[in-house]
Amino acid sequence: MKQVIRFVITLVLLCAVTPVQGKPLVPSTELKSAIKSPSSNIELVGHYGGRSSTLSVTDDFAMLGAGTELSIWDITNPVTPTQIGGVSLPAIPQDIAIAGHLAYVADGFGGGLQIVDFSDISNPSVGSSVITHAVNTVAISGTYAYVTTWDSDPFNSSLRVYDVTSPTLPIESDVITTSSLVHDLVITGTYGYIAMTPDNITGTLKILDLSTPAHPTIINSINTFCHDLDISGNFAYALCGYALQVLDISNPMTPTLVSTYTASVTGSDIAAAGDYIYLQGHSQYTTGEGVLILDISNPFNPVEAGFLPGPWNVASLVVSEGRAYLVDGDGLHIADVTNPANPVELSYTRLMGYIKHVTAGNRYVYLSNGSASGLWVVDATNPGIPVNRDIVPITSIDAKLAGQYLYVLGPGTPGYYGLHILETTNPANPTQVGSLPLTGEKIDVTNGYAYITIRQYENPFPPPTPGHFRIVDVSMPANPAQVFDIEGSFLDVATASHYAYVVKENEGLEVWDVSNPISPTLTGMYTYTANINDGYVAVSGDHAYVTTQGELRVVDVSDPRHPTEVGALTIPTGDLAVSVGYVFIAAGWDGLRMVSVSDPTHPAEVGHFDTSYWAYEVDAYSDKIYLATLEGGLLIFRLGPGLFHQINLPITINADGNVLHLP
């Protein structure tokens, strides 16, 4: 609920898109967005990855929630599905209902109901939005949209009815308090079925009479813990705990339980198609998780008919015209189920789920979630539709581009930890050329040396695990060698010229003369006025920019022996990047913050973008800003018109886009 409380965003009502004939397959050059920054100084132009949350299929297209984007995929060739369009939304889509050329999106925490016009499939746009609490399910019947919301908490939820005769101007016609968390909503004919549970232990299945669609009424309530359901003919198939319950609903006033299937059902979504039910589970005949296919031609006795091994965490499942489509949090699976006894997976399009770390280059960005899912190489030449080109099988918690090499720090896990050096002459397919086993968390590289820091960690029992400031000679990438190491709790490092600027926990900013990296000397110290246990640093010209808890501090380092604070700004803080006169801050729940430091003595916030999800790490290259937002994915921003090109200061930018000198 914290996300709902803190989600404050400006909406722009877009004009409805004029329908066009046919289905153009030309990818959009820009990502259409339902959200705008309160400042015109930064503009959202692209999105990549994030948790794959929900799915809907129509004709030759699949629409899926990927992070905070509703992405549209051409599935005419199910072996090679291709993204052709997308629209950025305020939050992560939880459910999608399609009616004609409109997609009604239940947009999760703070996003409300978003109505997307995809008349032009490659250029979808948001026609209207209704921001109403946290929306988690949506269904369409005629000219009415039925959405369920968490009004303030799961115990104060509601079903809201909107007249969408004019989709650009939905009108609320009724609200029914449900008093429990709604998991699923299905409408068939003049009846609606709601599966809800407040505590994952108890629950109810409520049946609605929709004969007066603007004002539905609850006509029955069954005490059963059901979290997902689908309807086929006169029967409702409900996932209740780890069992499938089949109910005869030929008379909705008196539904009757006719059978229960309990063998190895583990799913969180269910799809009925013809004589078959598809859900997550285990086969009775083979090992492993996958999609369990049950024959329901006799609803009184469902039996296993087939099994598709593989997907183990099905978030959303759709079966249409002999194909099963599902997302599992990290990708899109498509399977041929024309013969349910022998389903065959046709393709798996792997998408990147949570994104924690981002390193930006000229056309490519390198992404990681800090786990064994690998280092993702993404071509962002067209920021509207970034494309994954490679996944390098190493784990990254920080990385730095310098010249033709990418320097990657892996976590302290056997098999992954250490410094990995990748050659990026072919940026779409970087290859590892060297490595060095060591621990580290933050890295910067300049003049043939890598500077690495790691904080000290308190163990459950003394002594603590020491932190380090290390210097590694990477002038011969195939044979990196550590040349300096000192213990301490070091949080971050940035380099410029022959100095290293190191944030030391609870002490301040240390300035090290590294003109002789084998024997560096501590030259100067800027001490904080309070103990600080987190901090980040970036350097541009004669100034170091340090974020502490709730403040951006500007430190004049023109005299490295006497670093002096010359400016400060109270602002939500976190990881930061500096480029062409601006500091960009990944400020957690407070989104992306943009600070002008053209006058370092008076830093001023000039842009803000509320992300609704945790802004974890930021990097900048030229006029683009790249923000990792965990399950929300990677957001790509561009400086507003004129901001980048109006800067006429003489600047020096190295190969990885970092400003080396500003006057």
Image: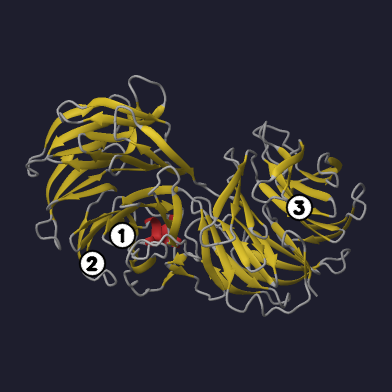
Residue at (26% x, 29% y) in the render: 294
- In this picture, residue 90 sits left or right of residue 170: right
Give the mark toward the camera: 3 or 1. Answer: 3
Distance of mark 3 from mark 2, alpha carbons?
54 Å
Where disc 1 sits, the SS reads: strand
Q: Identify residue for label 1.
A: 104
Q: Which one is nearer the viewer's eye here, 72 or 322?
A: 322
Measured as percent of width and height from the top left, residue 128 is found at: 33, 69
Q: Position of residue 72 (x, y in %)?
A: 41, 55
N-terminal label among 2 and 1: 1
Whichever of labels 3 and 1 marks the residue nearer the N terminus, that label is 1
Which image quadrant for residue 639?
bottom right
Checking the image for residue 164, the label placed there is: 2
Alpha carbon of mark 3 to alpha carbon of mark 1: how far? 45 Å
Q: Position of residue 76 (x, y in %)?
A: 37, 49
* Disc ID at residue 404: 3
Disc 3 marks a residue whose amino acid type is Gln
Height in image: 563 above or below 198?
Answer: below
